[in-house]
Image: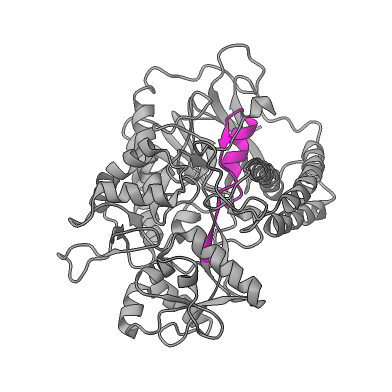
Amino acid sequence: MPEQINSDVLIIGSGAAGLTLALQLADQCQVHILSKASLDEGCTLYAQGGVAAVLDEQDSLASHVTDTLDAGAGLCHPEVVEYVVSHSRPAIQALIERGVPFTREAGSDSPFHLTREGGHSHRRVIHAADATGKAIETTLLGMARQHPNIQMFEHHIAIDLISHVKLGLPDENRIIGAYVLDRQADQVQVFHAPFVVLASGGASKVYLYTSNPDLSTGDGIAMAWRAGCRIANMEFNQFHPTCLYHPEAKSFLITEAIRGEGGLLKLPDGKRFMDRFDSRGELAPRDIVARAIDHEMKRLGAECLYLDISHKPADFIIEHFPTVYARCKELGIDITREPIPVVPAAHYTCGGVMSDLHGRTDLPGLYAIGEVSHTGLHGANRMASNSLLECLVFGEAAAQDILSQHQTTRPTTPIPAWDESRVTDSDEEVVVAHNWDELRRFMWDYVGIVRTDKRLQRAKRRVDLLQSEIHEYYSNFRVSNDLLELRNLVVVADLIIRSAMARKESRGLHYTLDYPLLDNSGPPQDTILVPWQD
């Protein structure tokens, strides 16, 4: 039987949010970090654009706040937006001091180069060429590996959170740890900790086409729901307008910064079209651009549209977008001479586990930071490059809150070992594969960029059936990585569908043909799903 593993803080996820938190805690706490795959694999690694922050003298905090509120279509929480934006400069300064190699204008002593992306009224996106996430992840991970109080566990997937209520204990409910599958040893371990932090990212893998890596299966959201936490605004799934369309280009994102530097969206015949949808053209917020591309593709029966920056000098393109240039070149596309074929793809989960300005959830001791959380920052549509900023700011905020308590909070409740006495090895793995494929296809077809009541009802019937099948399968067979991810994905799909059915209007990323207008009968409201009312 595997031994129990004890720490002060257990962090589920090894991206920017989790690593920022760990480095802030490690001088005073024993920290364990779980990663489903290798430590650097995750959405942070693939983030190209940058981090939004007010760094230019011509810019202002008020302008960044206004832009964020505008993109969020009335559902941002103003106090949260102001908090995050006001902490943007210190967050960037911390990364600079840690050695993140942000791009400068020219030469080592020049100011940092700032680009502009959709929804922003100023250049305020600091970046490391077009591989900002990789630069941040590599730097923070390198520091975490060297810290003696941080221990990292690769290829470990959390199964469920453990609380007093889960163990049937009568005392006050709080988090005490998690059951975790060691994928390489194929055994379930108990991680015991008085503080557990969900930094596990979003759930875009619930859709057939996504810019996210395979890890984005909504694990933290599903586990928090099962543990009794409220979930909010799951109907707002951001579809990035421009993923590379090529049979060999799995999930490769074409950074929004290309449009920020003058890239033009075009139809197959070479004509521009965005001005017909929004006066901001290519720099309109992502929800508007994605719907416009989706509309034109359906109208024309086109498999893709095109993003063209070839009118810019070749040296400029290669210098600013080396990652995109190299990947496209590998596939036979020279972006200095020809347009890039693009399609929209699921990109970001704007809803998630409800958490406050300290990252605290409904379950004492449980925190949620980064894409897994719903803080109120993004509202009905996340503005470009606010996501990494949210990870940095709330990683710091959660760390300060945990440090204020950890000396007086110690785990005392024993946790029973994982019980496999009533399950067997599966002889029907094909069921998992078929259910996985069916789920992602009907979510794309019925709960995608444009929705209707009929499509949502079809999706709900299918997800109810899948939940029943997957629950039965989970109850009878030993757990595996694919089964755990499918179990979490079907929960997330159900939360998305129910949230979309509850919103009788079109707002931000949620667009329905049955209710194409805003509901102005009262103040905009978050969609909040409550597990104890389920």
Residue at image position (52%, 36%) is 522
> In the picture, residue 282 is in which quadrant?
bottom left
The image quadrant where one finds the C terminus is top right
Observer-nearest of 351 and 162: 351
Compared across the picture, whether 444 is left or right of 120 comes to right
Residue 354, horizontal then vertical, whole percent: 51, 34
Q: Which residues make up the magenta segment? A: 216-241
> In the picture, residue 23 is in which quadrant?
top left
The coloring applied to the image is: one colour
Q: Is residue 159 visible?
A: no
Observer-nearest of 184 and 210: 210
Observer-nearest of 326 and 468: 468
User: For the image shown, how many numbered marks are present on the structure?
Assistant: 0
Residue 408, horizontal then vertical, whole percent: 39, 17
Residue 368, horizontal then vertical, whole percent: 48, 36
Q: Is residue 239 magenta?
A: yes
Q: Is residue 7 magenta?
A: no
The image quadrant where one finds the N terminus is top right
Q: Is residue 234 visible?
A: yes
